[in-house]
Image: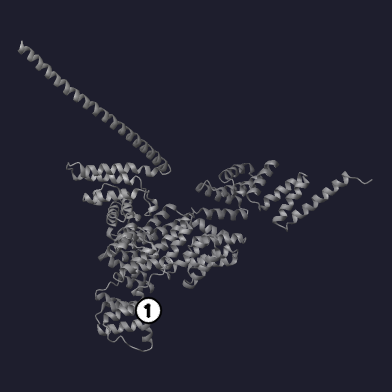
Amino acid sequence: MEDYTLAIITLLFALGIIFFTLWIKHRNLLKQRRRIVEKLGFVKENLSETSNKLDLLSRGVDTILSETPKVRGLLGVHQSLESAEALLFNQGIPISNSESCAIASHAAKSILNHYPGNSNENGNIIPGLHPLVERLASMLHQSDMMAEDIELSANEHRRLGELFYAINRTDWAADCFIRANDLDPEDEKTLLSLAEIQRKNGDIEALDRTIERLLAINPDNIGLLREQIILLDGKDASRINRNSVRLEALGENPAPSSTASELSEIARRAKIAERGLDDDSELTHLELIQRASKLFALGEITIAQELVQQSLEIENKNGPAWLLNAKILAAGENNTKKSLKSVRRAASLGEKTVLLESDILENDGRIDAAIEVLTEYIEYEPSDSEVRAKLCLLWLRKNSPSTSKKILDNAPEESWNFDNLHIMNGRLILSDIDQKRDKTGKLDQLLIIDALVSFDKAIELNRESGLAWLGRARALRYQGTHNDAEISLIRARRLIPDHPSIPIEEAQLFLDMNNIEQANAFAIESTTILKNNPTVLFLKGVIAARMNRLDEAISYFTRTLEIDPNHIRARLNRCSATFVKDDLENALDDANYLVERCPDHESARFRRAEILMHLGDWREAEKELRVLLTMNAGHPTALVLLGKCMIAMGRSSQAEKPLNKAIELNPNLSDAWFQRGELYLDFNRIDEAASDFEQAVKITPHHIDARLRIAAILHEADDIEKAIVAWRNILDIDPQNRLARRRISECKQTLNSKEKITHPKD
């Protein structure tokens, strides 16, 4: 029993302890709960306050960025950079080089999406983009990447380079520009940006290479041409000379160079030599030749020849001296034999003399001998483009363009890498254009384009070729682009100022532009250079005709034909001038000659038809017009003349069809309306005739014949008041018109008579 009681007491005691422990824990839990609730209250309050702050910040950002939506987009760039940095540096997993490049490329593109480029100015860069570009630069630096590792296009590399340049990371900017140039060598903006960095870094050699590439893209950049002359500092004479010539062709004075100073010194020493002072005694024979060559270029012939003789006395077996001696002798008169002797001596000493020898023979009138010399040389040196071009030119001057073309076609492919053959090809095409114009009276526009292509290729190979610019000017004139032709002529005159064809071409250009005064000035200049040249005489004849000095014009055209009987345009112009002078017999002779020699020449046939009509030979004129219309069915003026012939031959019923067609082809041809009005008068269709005469006057207000017909119709219809106005309109054009004055007087008398009848005396 006691044991049982003890067990119960022990159990109760144990339960009491347990309950007490649980109660203590419960109290602790309640305290913890109260503390947690208090903490949660504080956290909730903090969260609410933080939420309010974030909401306020968000609304503020929205308000601020509402006017600059581009800046908002930079948040996406930031996220892209965060992701790229995490992938490259923070994930702890090694990645391949290709994956690293792709990640960096994606990050760069995300930045470039917010920079359109087109300028290196910071004003074009969105505010806030600079630090992002700085992060990209740091990322690429840590990854040991170069511009070529980033997979971007040329334009994207250029824009990225501009961004790096804006944050003064010129090393990365230059790397990007170089990569952009590798991908697109023709992008001028990239090279200009690269040149700016190289200029600031003082990298002269690299800057020179960049400027050379820029000049290949834009050969006429005056600033770059001048800068390169300064950079070269006399180290590359050929490029300095090229740039100087190009600047002169652009109308700019090249910067002073050592060459200019040396020429000044040569001129000074030439004056000393003229005074009898000899300080050349200690010079070598090569130095003497160099000085003689420069003096010869300056026009100091006598002194140059003396220096050549001194050089030959020192060293007789001196090829350059004999060659220069030949040039000096050839510049004088009656020295052909002596100059040829010097040429052959120079040739025996290994000098290239073929061009000089051919020039001497050509100037002596021995063109066949010159051709033979060039032909023999070409057989041994077929790739010499300069000699082949000269041979083609001589055959062309002999009026054998087919032979010239054959020689050109046989040129090896490597010889076309020089400008000479392209210039010659363009000249042959121009010759073909002239021949076709003489045969048909029209310019072949497709051939003109071919000529332009040839001259443009020559200019691309040698921008300092004055002959290429001259040929281009002529082709552009034929094309009708006069402003571009004038620009090309200016370049040609600056490059080859003494070429005799330049003032001729300028005169022809200003004639086409209807600037008679300027054309006349250049024609006079041509006369001083080329006497009795048929082209010059023809130009002066055209100028005289434009100035309405017909007798003088006929005289010039006649002199042209005496020198060149086959000058088609001179004969056609003389035919027109004599026709205007009413010398129908001589005009018909020229027209017959033209039609017989050039049966496809539309202007010649049209002029012959006009002359025959004035002679009253209507049937022959009709035949000529019908031949012309078979050649060109859309010739409205020929259709008008055909209608006039029909009326004159009493076949008025057949005249309406060609006249209607002429009006349909050219509604602004007043003569067509007038002639159809005449036809309607014959048909007694007065209202239709008056309407056509009115249309003719509307197109050509000074059409006196149409106004006379209108006035006559009104006069015969007794519409006195309108008739008086019509007759007075005629007097406004021709104050001496007797018919109009007489008719006005008759109208006034008729009006007075009507007033007397209307108001009889009491």
Question: Within 10 angstroms of label 1, few (less than 14), some, or many (20 or more) residues?
Answer: few
Residue 102 in sight in this render = no
Q: Is residue 70 left or right of residue 10?
A: right
Q: Quadrant of residue 262?
A: bottom left
Q: Quadrant of the N terminus?
A: top left
Q: Residue at x 69, y 50 (%)?
A: 707
| Residue on which the image places disc 1 | 264
The image shows residue 23 at horizontal and vertical percentages of: 19, 23
Numbered label tally: 1
Q: Amino acid at mark 1?
A: Ser
Instruction: Please name whichever residue, 338 or 307, is drawn nearer the observer in this view of the structure.
Output: 307
The image shows residue 699 at horizontal and vertical percentages of: 63, 49
Instruction: Please name whichever residue, 382 or 507, is drawn nearer the observer in this view of the structure.
Output: 507
- Secondary structure category for the residue under label 1: helix
The image shows residue 655 at horizontal and vertical percentages of: 61, 44
Instruction: Please name whichever residue, 45 or 292, is drawn nearer the observer in this view of the structure.
Output: 45
Q: Residue at x 19, y 25 (%)?
A: 25
Q: Is residue 126 left or right of residue 560?
A: left
Q: Quadrant of residue 759?
A: top right
Check the image and report above or below for 279 versus 243: below
